[in-house]
Structure formats: structure tokens, C-alpha cells
Image: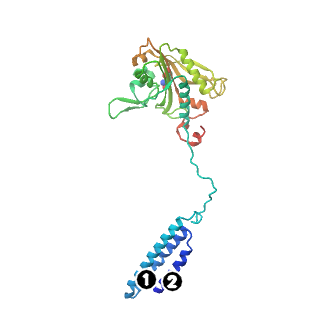
Amino acid sequence: MSDMDIELIKAQIDSDIEKINSAKDLEEFRVKYLGRKGILAQLTSSIPTLPQEERGSFGQEVNTLKNKILSLIDEQQKSINTKTPEAKGISCDISLPGISQELGHLHPLTQIIDEISAIFKRMGFSVVEGPEIETEYNNFTGLNIPLEHPSRDVFDTFYLKLPTTNDQRLLRSHTSPVQIRVMKSRKPPLAVVVPGRVYRPDAVDASHSFMFHQIEGFMVDREIKFSDLKGVLEIFAKGVFGKDIKMRFRPHFFPFTEPSAEVDISCIICKGKGCSVCGRKGWLEILGSGMIHPNVFKHVGYNPGLYTGFAFGMGIERIAMLKYGINDIRLFFENDLRFLKQF
Ligand code: DAH
């Protein structure tokens, strides 16, 4: 290698730089001159073969050349950056539609909670929420479910000890404890609905989940009667399932109501004739209800001789499954867009 070579290389650089049109060309140029086995590396490695007195000045020339190449690359990089995608060698069809941001929507359970709440709001009910971590008292004792009573099993749940206290706390197994909270903090007249999550230690299958949603409702005043309960629930059921459905009240037992009833609607599939959805009965159970038990009033400090009231509670997933013909409760919680997008 000699000065002559350097002149040749400079000429080569000038012609190569002319041909650079894209980032790819520029990278090839950089590798050709500055790469590990590039022309400058070769020049540098030839230095020890030169006569002693030439090495210094040759080395300097190589260095100057390197700096020149670096600044040329820099310049080219800037001009490529300001070029259009085509000029950069990237093919781009600007007539293609853009990538649009998809808008989400409310979860089907939230939609049905809103729909049911709206029906009750039109009848003068207010919407209240309560905590998912409850006291043992509000979930059981206050609702007339004494410690040793077998009906505790039905509402069994998950128990926890809070780190800050020794109190036994639990995940509420129904929304009914909010009755206790509201009645203790307010005076009648009351008309309240309570949507929210509840928990039970059930094995998960197509119709059970350890977490699901309920809506509780209750009304307390002087002279609230069973017929008020019937009227309110009829407006609710017709609002959700259509005005042609029929309702029936079946006697049942709940510790917190007396008398108690389970409420059925005529099967929305077979209209009462009997099919596989209603188990050939023609009726579908949708909720539990009754007149608030005098013991519940005593627990919250109301005079049962003065006030009466009704209460009801329903599973929201069940209502949504019946309304939309959904056959597996797990679909609500799996976040599968193929399911969610249908609502
Ligand atoms: N808490 C009951 C349950 O989880 C539902 C229920 C039944 C609520 C009757 C009520 C009621 O307020 O009066 O199964």
C-alpha cells in the first residue's frame, strides 16, 4: 500500500458515494470501507510492512481518510432520513387504509347490571354498593343466620384475618349484608338496589363459579306489603325479559325473610310448554325474595311493629345467561373476544 493507493481509494470513494440511494446502500458503503475486513483495516494492517520513516505520515493519512469517510456517512445518513420511504428503498403503498384503533365496550355483565339498575331507578330505587370483604355479622348473624344454623352452609364462603386486627372477615357470599349496612346508616323510607360481586367455595363448572355477581333489592317503610314486592318484581321481569312473560311465586325458606318465595318466569324458550332449557317444567327460577324478617329489623335497630319491608336477590350471570341463551358461566370470565364482541 502506498500514497498512490490512497489516491485511488479516494477516487473510488467519490464514485461510490454518488451511487448511494438507500440505507442499505449506505450500510454496504460503510462495511466496504470501515468494516472489520474493510479497505481501511487493510491499510492500517499494512503499516508495519512500510519503511520506518514512512509509517508516521501514512498512518496520519489513513486517519484523515477515516474521518472523511465518517463525515460522508453522516451526511448521507441525514439526506436519506429526509427522503420519502420509496427513496429510502422502503416500498409503501399510501393508498392502503390506515390501522384503526378498535374501540372497546362495556362487559356484558356491566351492561346487564346497568340495564337492571335503570329499571329499578325508574321506580325510585337508588343504587348503593357495599364492600366485598365483609364482617361475619353482616353476612350472617345480622341477617338472622345464627352461627350453628344449617343454612350457613348454603352461604358458606372464604374467610380471612385482616393483618391489622384479629377480627374474622370474609368475602361476602351474597349482597344481602348491604341491607344491614344501609338500614343501620339510614332511616326508612328506603328503596335500594345493590349490584356487586359475591364469592362461594364452589367448584367451577358450566353453571358455578367461585365468584359471581348479584343484585340485591329492598324496600322498607310503614305498610310495605307482599303485593308491593309482586308489583315491583313484575315490572323488573317484564323490563328484562319482555312483557309477555308470566311470573309465579313459590314458597321457599330464607332465614332473612318471612314469608319467603322463589320467583320463576315462564320459560323464554318454550313459552311455558316445557323444553330442555327449563327441564320440561315450563318455568325458570330467577330470584329469591320475601318480607324482611322481624329479627333483621331488630338487629339494625328498627321497630318491627312500625316498619315492614320486602327484599329480593338474584344472580346476574343467571339472568344474562337466560336472556342471551348463554350455556356456560365461564364465558363471562375468560376474556375471549369472540364471546365479548357479541354484546
Ligand atoms: N341472598 C340470597 C342468595 O344469595 C338471595 C336472596 C333471597 C336475597 C331472598 C334476598 C331475599 O334479599 O329476600 O341466595
Q: Nearer the viewer, residue 267 or 229?
A: 229
Q: Secondary structure at mark 1?
A: helix
Which of the 4 image quarters holds residue 55? bottom left
Q: Is residue 250 visible?
A: no
Res 219 label: none
Which residue shows up at 47% across the image and 13% down it?
Answer: 222
Q: Between marks 2 and 1, how big is the CA–CA gap?
A: 16 Å
- Image quadrant in which you'd find residue 3: bottom left
Amino acid at dot 1: Ser
- Total numbered labels: 2
Identify which residue is drawn at 46% across, 16% down. Answer: 293
Look at the picture and state if 79 lies above or below 53.
Answer: above
Give the residue number, with chain letter if any, for mark 1: 46
Residue 8 is labelled as 2
Residue 218 in percent (x, y) is at 49, 21
Label 2 sits on a secondary structure element that is helix
